[in-house]
Amino acid sequence: MRRLLYVTSNFLPAGGAAVLRALKTVKYLPDFGWRATVVTADAPSDIHRDETLEAPAGLEIVRVPSPLAFLRRRRGGGNNGAAGPRGVRARLRAAIIREALVPDSEAPWSLAAAHAIQRAIKGGRVDAVLSTSPVPSNHVAVRLALGRHRGRRLPWLVDVRDPWIDARGITGPNRSWTLLDRALERACLGSVDGFATVNEPLLELYLARYPQLATRPHAVVRNGFDPDDFEGEPAPLEGELASLGSRFDLVFTGRFYGGRTPEQGLAEALGELGRARPDFARDARLFLVGPRDPVYEPDLSRAAPVPVVRHGAVAYRLSIACQRRASLLVLLGGDFAAATTLKVYEYLAARRPIIAQATRGSELEKLLAGRPGVLFAPLEGGARALVPLLAEAYDAWSSGRLAPREDPGLDAFSRRTQTGMIADLLDEIVRAHHMPGDPSLASPVA
């Protein structure tokens, strides 16, 4: 069994998509001959904690203290995901992170993590190191620990889910110190032994930016779903969520972002159809389950007379239960990264009909094209494109024809399949690292 150091500052007990990709990968790696040790932070920085997620039995976790943990956003899980106005302290914290800490708030942690990685390598047999997004400091920590590409003792695989610097040359926080970000990105991503991304546009972006990567193992490893999470009956729901599925219930789980909000036509379409058809207004409801950001979700009054049920963040298993009880799942996404989101694959695994709104020609449209039970509306069409699809879905529901979807191609998106692709990349970089003539061959694990 080969050994992997998996470096991610986001891990249990935090929740969210960033944690789930790492958690499911380390769960299935032993099936492919790899066992992971996770190097992570001691204070989760994701948007909420999820105590219902469990690490695989026997997983070794090395927690590295965070010098500036107080700068991290930490909220409780459950029904407190709504965010109020940001105060002076929150704005000051955001400004410090954006301008002073490069590449992100985990920069001080990356220095400590680099020492922990070096100690782990010296303390036992390690065959490869993997760092993952969305936090670039994870990659900085490994680069500091392993050094330059030539003479590196261990091979390094990078898993990039969000662009460090996008195609326009802009960093995630859009700060003024972009030159430093570019230098760090070049030092890290330009020197890796293997490379994985979550979609084709992101892979093309980095192959064009660093042509040397084309000669090293690389692949698109999409997000996916764990079939184990969709077995048996859905978890019981309480309060206002307990009635889900008793009416024509549209469900959106997760967060809204720029380019993905109900203000781009969904609210207006619900209101228009509700006013035109009293039966639709009587039966339809829109459930929004997840943390609320007022910047991207300012006003849903245009959905009236259709009621909107707003619920805060819930544990992952409850989010899955909401999806599985929906009459119609709502998928909004306009930019190229939309097809990378975890929600897409969860929705497919939930086997419920989906109404999707995205830019024509986008990765999301390509991913969903031809899949059973998917109603696609071009983002450019706004409410006008959504209204007939909502009416079609409602009429099918009213007549009992809105049945669960059967999609035989879903296995390609299972977490086990995706982890197999990661393991293949790890095997490739290990073989390449130990080819005759490799200067690091003499002492791979000492």
Image (cartoon, rainbow, N blue to C red):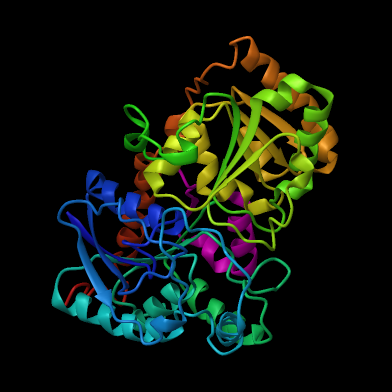
Residue 64 belongs to the span the image colors magenta: no
Where the C terminus falls, by quadrant? bottom left
Vertical position of residue 74 compared to residue 204: above or below: below
Vertical position of residue 118 compared to residue 354: above or below: below
Residue at image coords 69%, 73%: 170
* Horizontal side, residue 379 vs residue 407: left or right: right
Residue 201 belongs to the span the image colors magenta: yes
Instruction: Look at the image and tell me whether residue 360 can be seen.
Output: no
Foreground residue among 95 and 167: 95
Instruction: Look at the image and tell me whether residue 192 can be seen.
Output: yes
Query: Hey, which residue is sitting farthest bottom in the picture?
Result: 100
Residue at image coords 69%, 55%: 297
Foreground residue among 217 and 323: 323
* Number of numbered discs overlaid on the protein picture: 0
Q: Quadrant of residue 178?
A: bottom right
Foreground residue among 325 and 28: 325
Vertical position of residue 374 compared to residue 201: above or below: above
* Horizontal side, residue 94 vs residue 265: left or right: left
Where the N terminus falls, by quadrant? bottom left
Residue 179 screen position, x and y as percent: 65, 86
Residue 71 screen position, x and y as percent: 46, 82
Vertical position of residue 72 compared to residue 35: above or below: below
Q: Which residues are magenta?
A: 199-224
Residue at image coords 33%, 54%: 23
Residue 383 screen position, x and y as percent: 82, 37
